[in-house]
Each structure stands twice: as structure tokens, then as C-alpha cells.
């Protein structure tokens, strides 16, 4: 409930209030694969289910469920943001994700699985663990200690200790500029971006943490270092699992962590591809606006990602909670939900064929308004002039 400017009441029922629990579909499908594995005489074919859910089932559901452009009334936004039920969902699902991760470590560590089955689980469970960063992303933008602690716990699953400080201080400051390693450039394929993003965000995260600790009068190697806390717990857990299940379990765990990291890299790649903020006469960039992020309203994957795909509103107003993020009529739009775009990004010629036209339309067909891959600049200028 909220109030209009003239004092009249606005009563609003959020139809998506309980639908965010649909994110449980991924862990449930994953656990179901273990159940079916044992039910059908340890048939490893069922270990394909987590991977197929993420890359096949989710885009199909997006297609059939369509898009949702509904925004809650502004009069109820403050009340919705103060409703701790939405926070409870995120905190609960981080615990579920930890349980899922541990259960599959035990499963892989105790079963004789063929190589293709292990690879499928690395991709499927790794993608699920990467989805945890949707939750740590949401909580990491909050100021209270519980939310930030829960975000840190979530990051421990995949050993991504530098994520929140780099994302908040780095990415949100430099997004949609050539200076941002987490903003992809037109003509830059996903694999080249991956190398630039993974190394660039790590270096920037370490630098920001060093500055934060220096302001506290601390050195980098101290107990207060948020990065080292996460990396230490992740490292200890790897050693414990290796001790229990043997060194071979690392052949699952390390690639799993990499795939989880890759899920964030995939999101970063599609969220700002080719978009660029104008540099002003004072040398600073214009304020980040909704038009500087690719948006999508595909209902199913938006629920699974806590409205992360309403990325335009998130970057323009980063303190807005996921349940009140808005759609806009005049922002650049992706062709599918995130799952479909992730699959497209794996095939650079197909991605370029679909997205470069959209970038140029956004830029008013002026390539000077585009965040361009300098290594391909000559070819791109010849094509788009």
C-alpha cells in the first residue's frame, strides 16, 4: 500500500511476489537428476539434466511465457522495498545453492561417472553456481551487514571474492565506457572479452580493496580483507573435499568454479555490448542512463534472475531493489532472455549478425557513438561507416 501526492491510498498486489521462488526449479531439476540416476540403475544420461535446463529449457520457457512489461506503481515502491519477504527469498536461496553445490561434490566424489557426464555436470552445476552471483549481486548493493555477509558467503561457493567491491566501485562507475573491462565492445567476440574481463575485473577488484584497507590504516594482508576472506574459505573447502574424496575431485571443482565465473562474464558481455556513454567537455562521462544497458523483459528468465535483466533501471538507479525494477519503452532491447543470448554469444558470427545492427540503430547509425573494438575498428568503420 502507498499514498498518492494528494494523500489517497494506493493498494497494490504484486502478482510476482511468490513467483521468484521459481528459481528453485534449477536446484530441484538438478537434485532430480541424482534421484533418477540411482532409480534407473545409475544411468549417467540423467546427469545431462542440469545443463539442458539452463541452456535449452529456460530459453524455451521464455519463448512460451513471453514478456512482462508491468511496473509497480511508484506510490508503493517504498513499501515494497521495505518488505523483508523479498530479502528472505534471496537469503534462503543462497543457502539452497550451497546445499546443491555440496551435494553434487559428494555425488561426483562417490560415483564412477563417465567423462562426458562429469563435463555436463561441470557446465550445469557451474551455471547454477554462477546464478548465485545474481543473489550476491542483489545483496552486495545493500548497506546492512547481514546482506553483505550473505553476499560474501554466496561468493565463497565459486571463489569470486573480488566481485562485489569491483562491481559496485568499478563497473557501476565506468560502465559503457572503453575504460570498463566488464563492458563489451562492438566487434569483440565473447572469448576475447572473457580474457579481458576476467583479468581486468580481478586487478581492479584487488586495487579497490587495497585502497579501502589503506583508508582504514590496514595493509592488504590482514583479517579485514574481504577478498582474502572469500578466497581463504574457498581454498580451505577445496582442500577438505580433496582430502575426503581424493585429489581427482579437483578435476570437477576447479572447472566448476571457472564455469561459475563464466556465467557472470556471459552476463557482462551481453548487458552493455557496444553501448557507450558520451564524454563531456570536462573529460568526464555523462551520467549512466537507462539507455546505456541492454534490457529484456522475458518473464521466465527474469524471475530466475531476480529482474537482473531489467538492467537499464538497475544501472540508472542501482539502489532500487529487484522487486521494483522498471521497464522502459525507449531502451535498447535484447532479442531473447539471458539464456538465449548466452547461447548466441558462444557463436560470434551469429551474435554479431543479430546484435551489431541493433547497436547501430541505438547509436543513430553513427559508429562514433559506439563503444568499438579498436582491434576491428577499420573493418567496422568500412562496414558501418
Image: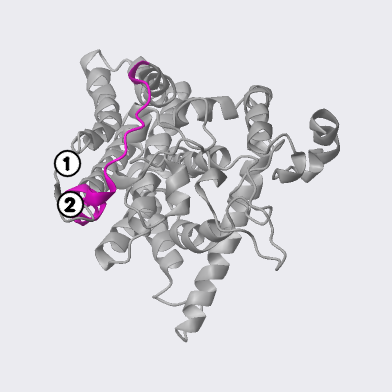
Residue at left 55%, top 61%? Answer: 173
Look at the picture and state if 361 lies above or below 257. above
The answer to whether residue 215 is left or right of residue 77 is: right
Q: Position of residue 111 (x, y in %)?
A: 32, 28
Q: Position of residue 220 (x, y in %)?
A: 51, 76
Q: Is residue 368 magenta?
A: no
- Dot 2 lies on which element? strand
The image shows residue 132, relative to residue 219, as above or below, that is: above
Q: Reply above or below: 305 against 35.
A: below
Please tell me in which quadrant of the rendered image residue 56 appears. top left
28 relative to 283 in the view: left or right: left
Q: Are marks 1 and 2 in contact (CB under 8 Å)?
A: yes
Q: Nearer the viewer, residue 63 or 222?
A: 63
Residue 122 image offset from top left, x and y in percent: 44, 33
In 3D space, how far apart are the residues under numbered discs 1 and 2 (Cα atoms)?
A: 8 Å
Tell me which residue sits at (53%, 76%) in the image: 211
Magenta: main secondary structure = helix
Quadrant including the C terminus = top right
Q: Position of residue 373 (x, y in %)?
A: 74, 42
Residue closest to the eye, 157 or 312: 312
Magenta-highlighted residues? 64-88
Compared to 191, does 300 lie above or below? above
Q: Badge 1 is on which residue?
A: 12
Quarter assignment of residue 179: bottom right
Q: Residues within 10 Å of mark 1 (few under 14, many from 20)?
A: few
- Front residue of 344 and 98: 344
Residue displayed at 42% across by 22% down = 59
Amino acid at each position: 500500500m502507498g499514498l498518492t501526492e494528494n494523500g489517497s491510498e494506493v493498494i497494490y498486489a504484486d502478482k510476482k511476489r511468490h513467483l521468484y521462488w521459481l528459481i528453485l526449479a534449477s536446484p530441484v531439476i538438478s537434485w532430480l537428476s541424482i534421484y533418477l540416476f540411482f532409480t534407473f540403475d545409475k544411468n549417467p544420461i540423467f546427469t545431462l539434466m542440469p545443463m539442458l535446463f539452463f541452456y535449452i529449457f529456460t530459453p524455451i520457457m521464455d519463448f512460451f511465457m513471453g514478456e512482462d512489461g508491468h511496473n509497480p506503481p511508484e506510490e508503493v515502491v517504498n513499501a515494497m522495498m521495505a518488505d523483508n519477504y523479498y530479502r528472505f527469498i534471496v537469503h534462503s536461496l543462497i543457502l539452497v545453492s550451497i546445499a546443491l553445490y555440496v551435494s553434487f561434490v559428494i555425488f561426483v566424489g562417490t560415483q564412477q561417472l563417465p567423462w562426458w557426464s562429469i563435463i555436463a555436470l561441470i557446465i550445469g552445476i557451474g551455471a547454477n553456481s554462477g546464478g548465485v552471483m545474481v543473489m550476491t549481486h542483489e545483496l552486495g548493493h545493500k548497506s546492512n551487514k547481514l546482506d553483505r555477509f550473505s553476499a560474501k558467503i554466496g561468493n565463497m561457493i565459486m571463489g569470486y571474492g573480488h566481485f562485489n567491491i569491483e562491481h559496485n566501485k568499478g563497473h557501476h562507475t565506468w560502465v559503457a565506457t572503453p575504460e570498463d573491462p566488464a563492458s563489451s565492445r562492438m566487434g569483440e567476440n565473447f572469448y576475447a572479452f572473457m580474457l579481458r574481463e576476467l583479468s581486468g575485473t580481478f586487478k581492479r577488484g584487488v586495487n579497490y580493496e587495497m585502497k579501502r584497507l589503506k583508508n582504514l590504516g590496514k595493509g592488504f594482508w590482514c583479517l579485514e580483507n574481504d577478498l582474502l576472506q572469500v578466497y581463504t574459505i574457498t581454498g580451505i573447502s577445496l582442500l577438505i573435499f580433496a582430502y575426503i574424496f581424493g585429489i581427482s575431485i579437483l578435476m570437477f571443482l576447479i572447472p566448476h568454479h571457472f564455469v561459475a565465473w563464466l556465467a557472470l562474464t556471459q552476463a557482462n558481455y551481453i548487458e552493455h555490448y557496444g553501448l557507450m556513454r558520451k564524454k563531456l567537455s570536462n573529460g568526464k562521462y555523462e551520467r549512466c542512463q537507462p539507455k546505456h544497458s541492454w534490457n529484456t523483459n522475458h518473464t521466465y528468465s527474469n524471475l530466475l534472475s531476480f529482474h537482473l535483466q531489467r538492467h537499464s533501471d538497475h544501472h540508472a538507479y542501482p539502489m532500487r531493489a529487484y522487486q521494483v525494477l522498471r521497464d522502459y519503452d525507449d531502451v535498447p532491447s535484447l532479442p531473447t532472455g539471458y539464456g538465449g543470448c548466452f547461447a548466441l554469444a558462444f557463436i560470434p558470427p551469429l551474435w554479431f549478425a543479430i546484435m551489431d545492427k541493433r547497436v547501430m540503430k541505438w547509436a543513430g547509425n553513427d559508429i562514433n557513438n559506439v563503444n568499438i573494438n579498436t582491434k576491428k575498428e577499420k573493418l567496422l568503420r568500412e562496414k558501418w561507416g
